[in-house]
Image: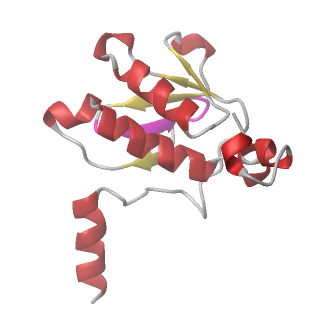
Amino acid sequence: MKALMLAGLLATGLLTIQAEGAVVIPLDARIYIDPGSSFDTWLTAALEKRHVPLTVTTDKSKADYAVEEGIRLVDLRNGEVILAWPVEGKEAHSRRTAEALAKRLADSVPRSAKHKSSALSKDAIWDF
């Protein structure tokens, strides 16, 4: 049963490589993406759509994390891979992959920051 679950996670790309416990990314962290792939545009849009307080940058010297091939998120301070899943071919730099990564990043940012706009109204339709 465990092997079947692991195979399912690998197949759907939901396996996360973590050193210890859950991945936590600090508020307003900067994520580097190579501008030649156009993935930076897809990811920026996906982060904005989900209201994730992270910034995409094309200047690696100003970044805290880097998105590399495959899709993997690397902590640039210590070189640790903190999120990873296999994505190949055209899917590696697609909108679908950017949206999946944005979802994973949203889950990694502290909850209080993600939902600070919800304090403005009880009805999400009025939060812009």
Give me the residue at 63% from left, 31% from top.
Answer: 54
Q: Height in image: 27 above or below 19?
A: above
Give me the residue at 43% from left, 42% from top.
Answer: 101
Q: Main secondary structure of the magenta part?
A: loop
What's the coloring here? secondary structure
> Is residue 22 highlighted in magenta?
no
Give me the residue at 24% from left, 43% from top.
Answer: 87
Q: Quadrant of the C terminus?
A: top right
Q: Is residue 21 visible?
A: yes
Question: Left or right: where does residue 94 sit relative to residue 16?
Answer: left
Question: Left or right: where does residue 78 sit relative to residue 81?
Answer: right
Question: In front: 17, or 87?
Answer: 87
Q: Height in image: 25 above or below 57?
A: below
Tell me which corner region of the image, top left, top right, bottom left or bottom right, holds residue 11.
bottom left
| Range drawn in magenta | 70-79
Q: Is residue 81 visible?
A: no
State the residue lying farthest toward the bottom.
1
The spot of residue 99 in percent (x, y) is 41, 40
Q: Height in image: 34 above or below 89?
A: above
Q: Height in image: 111 above or below 64?
A: below
Tell me which corner region of the image, top left, top right, bottom left or bottom right, holds residue 69.
top left
Give me the residue at 31% from left, 85% from top.
Answer: 2
Q: Quadrant of the N terminus?
A: bottom left
The spot of residue 120 in percent (x, y) is 85, 43
> Is residue 71 highlighted in magenta?
yes
The spot of residue 41 in percent (x, y) is 42, 19
The spot of residue 88 in percent (x, y) is 18, 39
